[in-house]
Image (tube, helix red, strand yellow):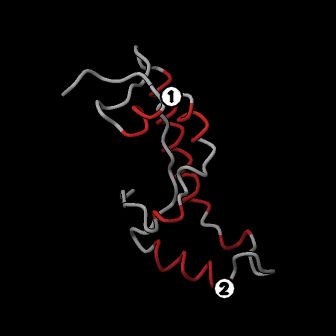
Amino acid sequence: MTLSPDPDPKQGLFVRSDQYSYIKQGVPAIYLKTGFADGGQEFQRIFRTEHYHQASDEADLVDFAELARFAGVNYRIARNVGNMAERPMWKSGDFFGTMFKGPMLPGE
């Protein structure tokens, strides 16, 4: 998998995600989404212009092998965080950690 930056941060997808409820309670959380790297930009362009909210938006558009790989990454992250000896903390000075008074790592 390739990490890529948010292609359209003006949409505010992170603050509209389910994970944001945790953030507002000061709990560090992540939001993984299929992105624009490795051909994702072209696929998403085609999907949004030709299939999104249309009758052609069918299950056969899903690459189930890639979906399983993506779900596996999410599972491994959750498992590893759940098995940590200490709870997750925000990086020192993190915007969300500071705003919502979450547990902060000591200054770096």
Q: Residue at x 58, y 41 (%)?
A: 19
61 relative position to 95: left or right:
right
- Check disc 1 and report its element: helix, strand or loop: loop
Q: Residue at x 18, y 28 (%)?
A: 108
Instruction: State which mark lies toward you, 1 or 2.
Output: 1
Residue 20 position within the rendered picture, expressed as x and y whole percent measured from the top left: 57, 41
Residue 72 position within the rendered picture, expressed as x and y whole percent measured from the top left: 53, 44
Q: Residue at x 45, y 26 (%)?
A: 101
- Check disc 2 and report its element: helix, strand or loop: helix
Mark number displayed over residue 88: none
Residue for badge 2? 50
Q: Tell me the kind of residue under disc 2.
A: Glu
Residue for badge 1? 27
Farthest front residue in view: 99
Residue 69 position within the rendered picture, expressed as x and y whole percent measured from the top left: 51, 52
Q: Residues within 10 Å of mark 1 (few under 14, many from 20)?
A: many
Q: Is residue 51 above or below residue 4?
A: below
